[in-house]
Amino acid sequence: MSAKTQFDLQQFLAMRTKTVNVALDKFLPSATTRPATIHKAMRYSLFAGGKRMRPALCLAAAAACGGKEADALPLACAVECIHTYSLIHDDLPAMDDDDFRRGKPTNHKMFGDGIAVLAGDALLTQAFEIAAQAKGWPRYPHQKIILEIARAAGSLQLVAGQVADLEGEGKKLSVDELRYIHERKTSALLCCSVRLGGMSANCTSAQLKALTDFGYHVGLAFQVIDDILDVTQTSEQLGKTAGKDRQAQKATYPAIVGLEKSRKIAENLTARAFAALSRIAGFKGKATPLEALAEFLLKRDK
Ligand code: GRG
């Protein structure tokens, strides 16, 4: 059995999920704060039961660099707010038009389209408010932290990926075009989560480079697996509508190269993520949670 599999990832995830949820609860206005509707809507999606993979990656990256979890926590919460905003907007009728997310009716189904748009907007803004309350580090003052998040979420990355995804519907895309979408729609925020964890530990530039390489490849593998699960799993297992990609005529790895080759691609991407970590001697021993997360994301079934 490898060190990675001996590590109790389920316990790691359960504890971090609890910590992140408690912190998010403190950062957000209460559900009764006026105007209550928007705070109820923000909290509805934020606490609907997401896997909290981005915060976990952020906290694990901080640990890999010898940082304190409490220092990374606001940044872990910030990325989860951005991720949840992107899901709320992605589910809107004007985008992917989904009725279920995180095992529950989508935000607009509960609160209406207008409030769902605003809940997404408010969560995106909330992320910056939370990040501004982080400590700030000698190599990474607030300006660098805010820039990092703004770039990952902006029109060159997360939003760019969503635009290309929308514009690609019904078109036959090449593997390169699909990779452009995956890099931006999914990998950018995962990679940003990992980088922020490193920054919160005041990591060296060599460590940040290795974490970037790791995050980029884990992020791409994550989306390839997401594409595979859309075909192989049921809506109940996923907590969202399965088979949507084919229905929306979306280009995906399984559609372009088939399921078997897609799995190989995800395995190769994960292997490259591991290789990135092994280049840094200083990570030895401390990167186990990060490695276990990469392995888990490859083998996940939801
Ligand atoms: C600006 C109006 C406007 C909309 C932008 C940027 C955006 C909307 C959407 C991003 C696209 C998106 C939803 C990408 C998919 C990434 C992905 C695989 C999400 C699922 O992540 P999980 O499995 O979800 O971690 P949970 O629910 O577990 O957190």
Image: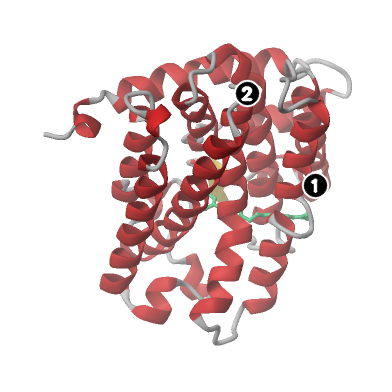
- Left or right, residue 75 beside residue 299: right
- Left or right, residue 49 beside residue 165: left
Q: Which quarter of the picture shows residue 125?
A: top right
Mark on residue 202? 2
Q: Residue at x 63, y 42 (%)?
A: 83
Which of labels 1 and 2 is toward the front? 2
Mark on residue 199? none
Asked if disc 2 is less than 8 Å from ligand 1, the answer is no
Asked if residue 237 shows in the view, the reply is: no
Residue type pointed to by label 2 = Asn
Q: Which residue is mark 1?
A: 117
Image spot of residue 143 (x, y percent):
83, 31
- Left or right, residue 217 beside residue 68: left
Q: Which of the pair 297/90 is nearer the observer?
A: 297
Can you name the residue that lies furthest to the bottom here?
172
Q: Residue at x 66, y 55 (%)?
A: 90
The quarter of the picture where the N terminus appears is top left
Residue type pointed to by label 1 = Val
Asked if disc 1 is less than 8 Å from ligand 1, the answer is yes
When the figure is inspected, residue 271 is found, relative to residue 84, above or below; the finding is below
Q: Which of the pair 196/285 is nearer the observer?
A: 285
